Amino acid sequence: MNEEEIQQKRRENEENATASRAKILGLPYLDTRSFENNIPLVPDLLGINEMHENYIVPLQKGGGDDHFQFMVTSQTPRSFIEKISNQYTSTGEKADFFLISLSGFNVFMLRYDPPKEVHYDDIKIAGEGDSETLAQVSQTLNSVGTDKVFDFLLDQADKLGASDIHIENLRDSIRIRMRVDGILHPVANIEKDRYRIFMGELSSRAGISTAATTPQSGHMQKDVFSGESSHLLNIRVETIPTMYGQDAVLRLFNFDETLLNLDLLGLTGEELEKIKEVVSHPRGLVLMVGPTGSGKSTTLYSMINALNTTERKIITLEDPIEYGITGISQIPINTTEGGSFADGLRSVLRLDPDVVMVGEIRDADTAKTAIQASVTGHLVLSSFHANTTAAAFSRMIDLIGTNPIFSTSIRMVIAQRLVRKLSESKEAYAPDEAEKKYVARVLEGLSSDVVSKELGFEWNPEDYKLYRAVPGGEEDPFGYKGRVVIMEQLSVTEEIQKFIRGDVEDVDTMAIEKAAKEIGMITLEQKGVLAALRGETTLEEIGRVI
């Protein structure tokens, strides 16, 4: 029996008990379930406090203006019923009384006296040394109602565009931080009893234990409303026991299928064309590499969405499923409880898919199975942990050895980072000598024509501008707004295949990168510097991320 059925059963029992009580009290019984939420209310007959104190609600005027009907409960004082009856009789009017259940009375009172909506101040991100904002947000979080504080925090994180919330135990308090545009910001220090509320909510919603002594993973969803629109927030929960209690990280995935679109990733026309050309082939292996939080999943999902037509069978294997996409068969793989991507992949290949996405290649078994699938008529997309495209090849060779089949299956490796994007308040400046030397060193080997094409304007290495962040007030406290993709693409040609097959003895990251640059690959660092020259970000951001 589900929760709704349990509530209905309880109400049925209460109504039966009220009907029996009505016979004892000598009052007609009234079952209000069919009309309690929609019958017009009768205003101005009784005061709100009077109704609360005496468990009485006006029902309607009936049989003429001098005939009134009231609903009472078994807790209504008999003396008050007599008082109301005498009051109307003395003026030549008539009052009838009906006994209703306490639940029915509560429904009516919620309509007569709806709870007042409390509006709390929005959370603001504190700048470095800004203890005043920190104290203000802490006070707000400590004052939000117990039943609302967890949802309030999630709503505020979504409004700020945070990618994750960190709830951390300190000795005397709980620290809350949010990661916005890739940077962790302190938000508040809250009382210990708030922590118990958060963990209680996580326990019931995400299926984790508050008493666990080992790390846990969970998942929950929440509808977030903004004005008249709403969207679904997928939340991945990770907890780990620490010295003072369980720390939790909530990773937020703002699910909107329309945003999973290659055209919305902010790629250059050439980068976009290369991806579309590769994924349009019926078979092959495409790898996305980069650290956690570099946007790999969003890019992979956008590729999947681009391929999502009625002519294709698409299956994903994920740990956990971060976005639910219409028209795609998505299979959760719980690796913490013995699940295996390799076993899952072997199983789904029997279903004759056209496209398979493997959440992550973590071991030789999964790698070999994915390679085998990609040469037998399937397009396989996956993520892989490596810093650069060249490092991905080097790591894969360490994992499975030199492999002729791998050399024919792999079509493209994409390395990706997300850097903060400068807002409109940015300021142009002339680079100093150290910055000029750095830019010249990074762009060495790229012709002026290539650089100009990437920049979108004529490149003059002797005369150019860089840009710095300028905070633009309360709405723009850091001078950055959003993030931009920095992408390195390595298309596998005959020169790269030589390393994978074992035709070249010197198989290391630097040798592979050198060969890739000779065939026209632009590295992550070069792409980052070019983005800084276009005014999209700063050299400081490139140094921090890449």
Image: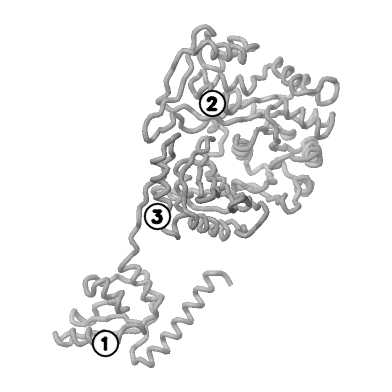
Indicate the position of residue 82 as horizontal and vertical percent values.
24, 88
User: What residue appears at the point 48 percent right and 21 percent down from the top-left corner?
Assistant: 535
Which residue has dot 2 on it? 541
Pointers 1 and 3 in contact (CB under 8 A)? Answer: no
10 Å crowding of disc 1: few (<14), some (14-19), many (20+):
few
Q: Secondary structure at mark 2?
A: helix
User: What residue appears at the point 57 percent right and 31 percent down from the top-left corner?
Assistant: 418
10 Å crowding of disc 3: few (<14), some (14-19), many (20+):
few
Give the spatial CA distance, label 2 vs label 1: 76 Å
Q: Earlier in the sequence, mark 2 or mark 3?
A: 3
User: What residue appears at the point 14 percent right and 85 percent down from the top-left corner?
Assistant: 91
- Residue 95 lies left or right of residue 362; in this view the side is left
10 Å crowding of disc 2: few (<14), some (14-19), many (20+):
some
Which residue has dot 3 on it? 143
User: What residue appears at the point 37 percent right and 51 percent down from the top-left corner?
Assistant: 120
Above or below: residue 304 compared with residue 406: below
